[in-house]
Image (cartoon, rainbow, N blue to C red):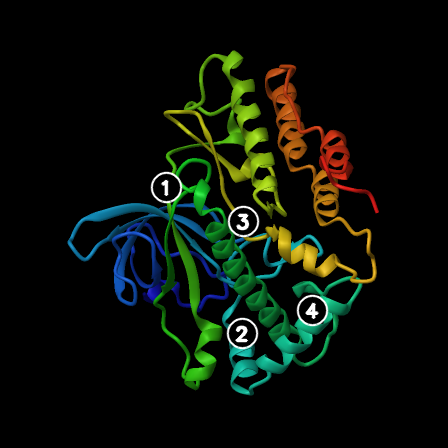
Amino acid sequence: MDDLEIPSNGRNAVPPPYGTPMQLHVLKSFCNLPAGRPVQATMITVYTITMSPVMDVTVRTASGSEIRAALKVYDRRLGRDLRECLGKHVAHTPEVETAFQYFVKAKKMAPFLRELARRSKEDFTPPEPWHFLDDAGPDCQAEFEAALWAKCDGYFKTETEAYDRLCHLQGEYIPRMLAHVRVIVPVPNVPADLGKYFELKGVLLERISGYNLGDLPISPLAPSDPKKWPSIIQSSVNLAHKLDASGVLMGDCAPRNVIVDKRTHMPFFIDFAQAEFKEILLQAWHDPKDKGWNPEYEYWKTVATRNNPGAIGTEMKGKLKKIKNMELKGIVYPNYESILKEIQQPKKGQKLG
C-alpha cells in the first residue's frame, strides 16, 4: 500500500486516496474474515482523523462477498489532536520519520518505553508525548514519536479490551467488533524484533449508518420533529450510565462519541481508546491496611465525579439552546447520592463492624 508511505514533500502524512485498495492482515476475527490471512479493503471515505484515522471501507471476504465496515487505525503519524503540542500541530515529515527510524535501529526504543512506563506509574504528572519536545536533547523529536507510538499502542489495547468486556452490549448499544487487524505497509529494513514499532494496528467495526449526536439539531437524518430529540438524548444519557455500571468508564465521553442510527434513532457509543476499567482502577486504589475500604463505593464515587451522563446532557443542552434556541427539559440523570448511600447501607442480615 504505497499510498500510506510518508510523503516526500514534507507535508503531514495523510490517509490514502478514496478508492485505494488496502491489504489488512486479520489478527483476530469475530466474523467470517479468515484469521491469520490478508484481506483486501477499499476506502470509501474518511470519517475523522482527530486522534486516530477512522475510515468507511469495504472488505472482501474469502468467499468473494463484501463487508461494509468502519476501519480505525492507531497511527502515530496521523491525528490532529494526537500530534498537538501547546496548541499547535506537530507535522510528521520525512525528516521526522528518519529520526525515529534511527532511534529504533539504535535499539533505544525498549529502554525509552521502560522509562516511560515507570514515569507514567510513579510521576505525579505522567509525561505526555509533547513533553519530550521541550527537552531539546538530540533525540527529542524521535522520543516524541516514540511516546506517540506508545500512546497509540495503548489505545489499541484499551479499545480491544473494552469491546471484549462489553461483548454483551455489542450490536445493540455499541458496534459489533468484526476483527483486529494490521494494515500491511512497507516496513523499514530493521531486525524482526523491531518491526512491531512500524506496524499499523487497527480494528474493523460494524458500520452504524446514522448521524453524530452532536449534530442532532442540524442533521437531515435526525427526526424533523424537535419533540423527539429529548428522548434520543435521554437514551444516550441512560447508555452512558449503563457503560459505567458495566465497569467500563469512558475517559472521553461526549456527544461526538455517540452515533445515532438513522432508522431507529437509537444511540451507539464509540471510541473506547481512553477508557478505564473498574477492577484495574480498584487494584490501583486498594490499600490493604484500610480495613473499611469499600470498592463499590470508591468506584461509584469516581463515576459520580466523572459524571459521563451529565457530560452528554449538558453539552446537548447547550447545543440546542445555541442552535435552535430550544430549552432541553426533563432529562433524568443518575442519582449518585442515592447510589452511594445505598452502597454504604449494610445488606439485610449483615452486621456492622
- Counting residues from the N terminus, which is met first, the one under dot 2 or under dot 3? 2
- Residue under label 2: 95
Disc 2 to disc 3, C-alpha distance:
32 Å
Disc 3 to disc 1, C-alpha distance:
16 Å
Q: Where is residue 68 in the image (x, y as percent from the top left)?
A: 29, 44
Q: How crowded is mark 4: few (under 14 residues within 10 Å), some or many (20 or more)?
A: some
Q: Where is residue 101 in the image (x, y as percent from the top left)?
A: 51, 79
Disc 4 to disc 1, C-alpha distance:
37 Å
Q: Position of residue 311 (x, y in %)?
A: 66, 34
User: Answer yes or no: do the residues labelled 4 and 1 have beta carbons within 8 Å?
Assistant: no
- Counting residues from the N terminus, which is met first, the one under dot 3 or under dot 1? 1
Tell which tag, 4 or 3, sits nearer the viewer: 3
Image quadrant assignment for residue 316? top right
Tell which tag, 4 or 2, sits nearer the viewer: 4
Q: Is residue 124 above or below residue 249?
A: below
- Residue under label 4: 133
Please tell me how many numbered marks the rendered image carries: 4
- Residue under label 1: 207
